Image: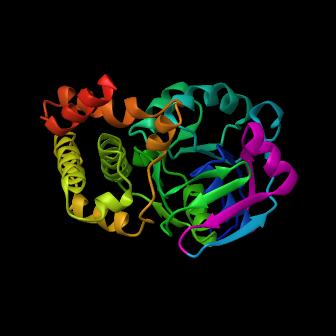
């Protein structure tokens, strides 16, 4: 790529829920070449009527037309693939990515589970798989319609090894920012992904433990204290892993929480309440395993894990 040369990237987003659907919505609205991979009634509605985004904070909604299909019928070769599925659905994306990717295709997983990029890289050795994470609170309200709970929309991504850096990564960051998404190309993605994990894991775990909504964490009380304690345990793990946090993540995460609608819950809570598969293994039990691996005490996580296993 020559200096200053503009690349028109072809984007594919696997998953059209609160992560992928919202990302695709803003990118398409900004005129980017983006296609969603969806399924079931949600896919049918998007194909027939477009994708609607409702914003909880101002009660507005807007509908846009966006290309959408399923894995079976997608036949293009994207430059960039955002993987925005739940952790338990990750494995089924691997053969699909192998089929559609070109040699230069960049894969950016933005899952809640820490370490996803490295695991995917082992299964996709011929491609560049970065690490990534997203700050957004949203869900599918009904087929064809997404509900965004708060204004934060921040995607962080980057390579684990600086030798893997490619100029296209800066173009991806620019495309995100053009789309009114706060895109950050990280110099230390291991730390930044763990920082995100220090929010999504404690809020999901404590939310389940107390059947809590954002309102319960926005005020002083047992739920808020458990949330802060679990963040401190993740911080201790980060120290042991050689990527110590450089800011007070409890303070950062409480600020994120303060911007959510009081009735907001996590996707893990919603999945479990609906009797669906959930990310409880990667978001809760994995932290207990990490504590054992790095010899870091995580008593709050052990307490929560014990109760959740009993349930």
Total marks in image: 0
Q: Residue 43: where, in percent of width, then height?
A: 77, 43
Q: Which residue is nearer to you in this view: 51 or 240?
A: 51
Residue at figure coordinates x 66%, y 47% from the top left: 16
Q: Is residue 237 left or right of residue 59?
A: left
122 and 59: which is toward the camera: 59
Vertical side of 105 occupied by 305: above or below: above
Residue 266 visible to an observer of this rendering: yes
* Quadrant hosting residue 146: bottom right
Residue 71, located in which quarter of the rendered image? Answer: top right
Q: Is residue 35 magenta?
A: yes
Q: Position of residue 247 (x, y in %)?
A: 22, 63
Residue 109 % position (x, y): 53, 43
Q: Quadrant of the N terminus?
A: bottom right
Pick the front one: 117 or 36? 36
Q: Position of residue 127 (x, y in %)?
A: 59, 36
Color style of the picture: rainbow
Q: Which residues are magenta?
A: 31-57
Does the segment drawn in magenta span residue 14? no
Please indicate whether residue 308 sits to the left or right of residue 18 in the image. Answer: left
Q: Residue at x 27, y 34 (%)?
A: 287
Residue that appears at 72% across and 41% down:
38
What is the quadrant of the C terminus in the image? top left
Give the side of residue 3 with respect to residue 287, left or right: right
Can residue 77 be seen in the rendering of this structure?
A: no
Residue with the most extreme right position:
48
Q: Residue at x 12, y 34 (%)?
A: 297
């Amino acid at each position: 790529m020559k200096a200053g040369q503009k690349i028109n990237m072809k984007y594919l987003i696997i998953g059209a829920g609160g992560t992928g659907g919202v990302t695709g919505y803003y990118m398409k609205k900004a005129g980017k070449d983006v296609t969603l991979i969806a399924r079931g009634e949600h896919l049918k509605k998007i194909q027939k009527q477009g994708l609607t985004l409702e914003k909880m904070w101002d009660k507005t909604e807007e509908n846009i037309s966006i290309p959408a299909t399923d894995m079976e019928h997608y036949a293009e070769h994207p430059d960039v693939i955002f993987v925005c599925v739940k952790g338990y659905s990750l494995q089924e994306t691997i053969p699909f990515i192998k089929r559609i990717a070109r040699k230069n295709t960049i894969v950016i997983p933005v899952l809640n589970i820490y370490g996803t990029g490295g695991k995917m890289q082992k299964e996709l050795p011929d491609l560049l798989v970065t690490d990534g994470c997203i700050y957004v609170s949203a869900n599918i309200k009904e087929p064809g319609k997404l509900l965004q709970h708060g204004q934060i929309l921040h995607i962080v991504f980057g390579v684990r090894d600086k030798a893997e850096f490619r100029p296209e990564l800066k173009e991806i960051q620019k495309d995100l920012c053009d789309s009114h998404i706060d895109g950050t190309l990280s110099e230390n993605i291991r730390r930044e992904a763990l920082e995100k994990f220090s929010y999504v894991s404690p809020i999901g775990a404590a939310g389940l433990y107390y059947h809590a909504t954002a309102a319960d964490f926005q005020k002083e009380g047992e739920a808020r204290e458990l949330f802060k304690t679990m963040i401190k345990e993740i911080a201790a793990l980060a120290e042991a892993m050689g990527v110590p946090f450089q800011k007070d993540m409890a303070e950062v995460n409480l600020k994120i929480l303060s911007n959510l609608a009081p009735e907001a819950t996590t996707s893990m809570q919603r999945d479990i309440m609906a009797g669906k598969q959930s990310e409880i293994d990667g978001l809760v039990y994995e932290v207990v395993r990490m504590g054992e691996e790095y010899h870091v005490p995580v008593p709050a996580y052990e307490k929560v894990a014990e109760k959740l296993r009993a349930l």
